[in-house]
Image (cartoon, helix red, strand yellow):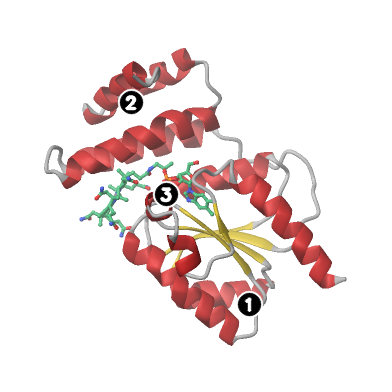
Amino acid sequence: MDTREPLHQELETALLSLNKVATRRIFKESGLSPIRFAEELFMPVLDRIGAKWERGDCALSQIYVSGRICESLLNELLPTAPAEQSMNPPMAVATLEDSHLLGKRLLSSVLRSSGYHFHDYGQQNLENLVSKVQFDGIRILLVSTLMLSSALRVKELRRRLDKQGLQVKIVVGGAPFRFDQALWREVGADATSPTATGALAIVRRLADEVRHENQ
Ligand code: B12
């Protein structure tokens, strides 16, 4: 049995009974950093809650409040100021036609606490995202999508960026890419990672590639 299983069950019960106080207590008692807590506990437990909802074993309102509890706790716990100055190529994060925001929130915190500077475009549709990327001269774009329909829109994003002659490295992530490990290539992305912390090594590598291309 996964050694975290009892903790997963405790957290699932707290979230499904909409108990923010118990959720905060579980975080404190876990001794984990906020990012590890989010990746090792929130993410698998929200996956389970999502699967329960799909089977009709819990209400959409329970998913909604669970998501809101996780979101507000992460807002309390995660850093918002950059740790240090770092020179990186123009970079941005966004969700694409998707209002699931927790993955992007986590990604922003991880990048920020590692000293990266980037635009946080929030929730975007395809048209606006392409315009913003063009306007800001973005070279590395990190896109978070949680719905399969949104993940598939990355293909069109790639096509539009290429058509405009914009040299942009696209990094994708979110549930559809965790569940289908070939999907990132199919939609024409340059890289993916199942976790926000995994994005760090990718961004470092892509930033080097962009610097090389600029020389
Ligand atoms: C919470 C939740 C919600 C909340 C969102 C609250 C919020 N403010 O974000 C609410 C209730 C609003 C919601 C709404 C809906 N939801 Co919802 N939701 C979820 C749930 C249970 C958890 C998602 C989550 O926050 N996980 C925690 C975060 C931290 O995990 P994560 O985003 O995956 O991020 C991790 C990694 O993926 C990675 N990552 C994420 N992004 C990126 C980006 C990059 C570049 C990288 C490298 C890594 C990375 O890093 C994170 C870990 O470090 C999922 C279930 C699931 N399996 O994901 C369903 C789920 C995504 N929802 C689903 C659906 C269908 C909906 C609705 C359409 C329901 C409805 N009928 O209204 C709406 C649509 C909203 C919309 N238009 O976008 C489906 C999608 C199914 C599909 N095949 O497309 C899922 C999979 C549930 C299910 N099993 O059916 N939802």
The residue wearing badge 3 is 178
Residue type beneath disc 3: Arg
**Mark in the foreground, 2 or 1:** 1
Residue type beneath disc 2: Lys
Residue type beneath disc 1: Gln
Instruction: Give residue 84's position: percent from left, percent from top.
Output: 78, 41
Of the numbered discs 1 and 3, the one sitting upstream in the chain is 1
Of the numbered discs 2 and 1, the one sitting upstream in the chain is 2
Q: Residues within 10 Å of mark 2 (few under 14, many from 20)?
A: some
Foreground: 136 or 193?
193
Image point 43% across, 54% down: which residue? 177
Q: Is residue 62 toward the left or the right of residue 130 in the image?
A: left
Q: What secondary structure is marked by label 2?
A: helix
Residue extending furthest toward the right: 215
Q: What secondary structure is marked by label 1?
A: helix
Q: Is residue 189 toward the left or the right of residue 68 in the image?
A: right
Residue 134's disc is: 1
Q: CA distance from mark 3 to mark 2?
A: 27 Å
Q: Residues within 10 Å of mark 1 (few under 14, many from 20)?
A: some
Quadrant including the N terminus: top left
Is the shortest distance between ligand 1 and the CB of mark 3 under 8 Å?
yes
Q: Residues within 10 Å of mark 3 (few under 14, many from 20)?
A: some
Q: Is residue 146 toward the left or the right of residue 79 in the image?
A: left
Image point 43% across, 61% down: which residue? 183
Image point 30% across, 19% down: which residue? 10
Is the shortest distance between ligand 1 and the CB of mark 2 under 8 Å?
no
Q: What secondary structure is marked by label 3?
A: helix
Residue 20's disc is: 2
